[in-house]
């Protein structure tokens, strides 16, 4: 049992983070694609460790997710939002 946590509770919490990443964060737009349910798992694991083991702040998690989207994935979130506005207009 890592750091005194129940492994079943840990799995449940990771599943919640995974769901949030897929439904709320989703920088590459794979929400609803059954073959992509594990797309963000590496980032889920890192964010979970940051939260539970490192006691990261909201700002630290935000910075990590921004880094993942912009540096690791090479995305420009501002352009994505602009495209969505254009598509909706």
Image (cartoon, grey):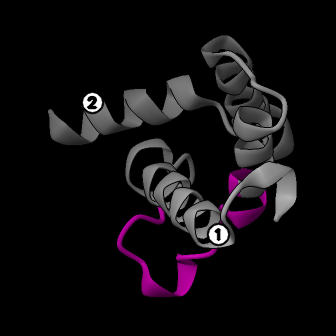
Do callouts 2 and 1 mark residues in contact (Cβ within 8 Å)? no
Q: Nearer the viewer, mark 2 or mark 1?
A: 1
Q: Secondary structure at mark 1?
A: loop
Identify the residue at horizontal 48%, vertical 36% (top origin). 80
Q: Which residue is mark 1?
A: 39
Classify mark 2: residues with Cα within 10 Å, few (<14), some (14-19) or many (20+).
few
Instruction: Locate the N terminus by quadrant.
Output: bottom right
| Depth check, front residue: 53 or 50 | 53
Residue at the extreme front: 4
Residue 19 is tagged as none
Identify the residue at horizontal 68%, vertical 26% (top origin). 61
Q: Earlier in the sequence, mark 2 or mark 1?
A: 1
Count all numbered tags in the image, as a single digit.
2
Point out the stretch of residues depicted in magenta: 30-44
Image x and y of residue 77, in percent = 56, 30
- 43 relative to 19 in the view: left or right: right
Query: Which picture quadrant has residue 33?
Result: bottom left
Instruction: Locate the C terminus by quadrant.
Output: top left
Mark 2–mark 1 distance (CA, rounded to whole Å):
25 Å
Residue 85 is tagged as 2
Q: Secondary structure at mark 2?
A: helix
| Depth check, front residue: 69 or 12 | 12
Image x and y of residue 58, in percent = 61, 17
């Amino acid at each position: 049992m890592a750091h005194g946590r129940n492994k079943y509770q840990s799995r449940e919490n990771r599943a919640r983070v995974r769901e949030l990443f897929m439904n709320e964060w989703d920088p590459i737009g794979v929400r609803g694609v059954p073959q992509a349910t594990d797309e963000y798992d590496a980032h889920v694991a890192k964010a979970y460790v940051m939260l539970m083991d490192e006691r990261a702040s909201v700002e630290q998690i935000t910075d990590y997710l921004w880094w993942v989207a912009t540096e690791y994935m090479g995305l420009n979130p501002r352009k994505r939002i602009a495209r969505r506005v254009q598509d909706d207009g």
